[in-house]
Image: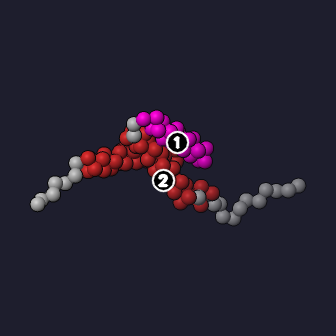
Amino acid sequence: MSKKVKPVIDVDLDEERKPRTVLIVIAFSFVCGLCLSLFASISGPLKYLFSLLALIVGIKMFGKLDRVGPRIWFVSLSIIWYLLLTIIIAFVQYAQDNPLPTNG
């Protein structure tokens, strides 16, 4: 007759992996947001490659983390990265198309 021994210190394993989970969510959401902003910025058939890549990144991230919280953060941060990176790309394209006039 064996008894189950209760651990002296009850450690939540999710708390031990919390920094790793945060880094995974931030990295995957950045890559996904970058792919989506490139999809919105590029014309031609290459843009669909970035769309497919964003889908694959999302599927991989959802496979890695099975909890709802990180998944919500992933979607939210991907949208924020998408908006931020799209604005940066628009600024860069505008600066390239409209150079500053030279005085002289």
Q: Position of residue 100 (x, y in %)?
A: 19, 54
Q: Tell me what residue is drawn at x 50 percent, y 53 percent.
A: 27
Q: Tell me what residue is drawn at x 56 percent, y 41 percent.
A: 56
Q: Tell me what residue is drawn at x 30 percent, y 50 percent.
A: 92
Q: Position of residue 38 (x, y in %)?
A: 41, 43
Does the magenta run of residues contain 92? no
Q: Residues within 10 Å of mark 1 (few under 14, many from 20)?
A: some
The mark that comes first in sequence, 2 or 1, is: 2
Q: Which residues are magenta?
A: 44-68
Q: Is residue 48 above or below residue 8?
A: above
Q: Is residue 70 left or right of residue 84?
A: right
Q: Name the kind of residue labelled 2 in the image.
A: Ile
Q: Name the kind of residue labelled 1 in the image.
A: Leu
In the picture of the structure, the residue carrying the numbered disc 2 is 26
Q: Secondary structure at mark 2?
A: helix
Q: CA distance from mark 2 to mark 1?
A: 17 Å
Q: Position of residue 5 (x, y in %)?
A: 77, 59
In the picture of the structure, the residue carrying the numbered disc 1 is 53
Q: Position of residue 48 (x, y in %)?
A: 48, 36
Q: Is residue 91 left or right of residue 15?
A: left
Taking the image as drawn, is residue 58 in sight?
no
